[in-house]
Amino acid sequence: MNTDKIYAEQLANEYAPKDTSKVVALKKLDARAKLPANIFTYTFGIIMALIAGTGMCFSMNVIGDGSTVSFVIGVIIGLVGLVGMGVNYPIYKKMLNNGKQKYAFEIMELAKEISND
């Protein structure tokens, strides 16, 4: 196996002009269908994890004055964060299905064209 030849071919492919083929268009449509769900899921999940962490800090007296009120507020904030993390996946699945339905016709037509060629 000639690794220099493989490396040279990879480098040449990287600098070669890219053709906009139907497969590339299909990949872009697939990414466009999934992107909003992914962005929302990551953003919402991070925010809810931070909220849960803040609640835990309140309840363990890292933040706040260490009173019972601070503990109760921490538990409530933590539960809000945990519930948010729990509903994140069902929301993601719903958004992903909506995105797939929105682009299903275009993706299917392009896939049929590719398979017929």
Image (spheres, rainbow, N blue to C red):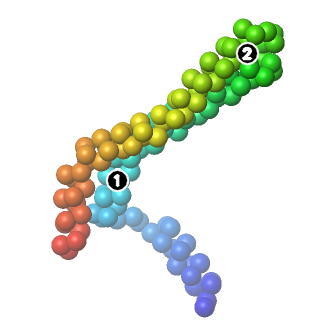
> In the rendered image, which residue does mark 2 sit on?
71
Image position of 105 with respect to 39: above or below: below
How many circles with numbers are drawn on the protein?
A: 2
For marks 1 and 2, give the one nearer the viewer: 2
Q: Is residue 112 visible?
A: yes
On residue 30, the disc is 1
Residue drawn at 25 percent across, 43 percent down: 102
On residue 117, the disc is none
Residue drawn at 78 percent across, 12 percent down: 64
Query: Observer-nearest residue: 85 or 34?
Result: 85
Residue 30: where, in percent of width, then height?
A: 34, 53
Residue drawn at 34 percent across, 61 percent down: 24
Mark found first going from the N terminus, 1 or 2: 1
Assess disc 1: are there few (<14), some (14-19) or many (≥20) residues with their C-alpha within 10 Å of its C-alpha: some
Query: Observer-nearest residue: 33 or 50?
Result: 50
Q: Is residue 39 visible?
A: no
Three-letter amino acid code at the position of disc 2: Phe
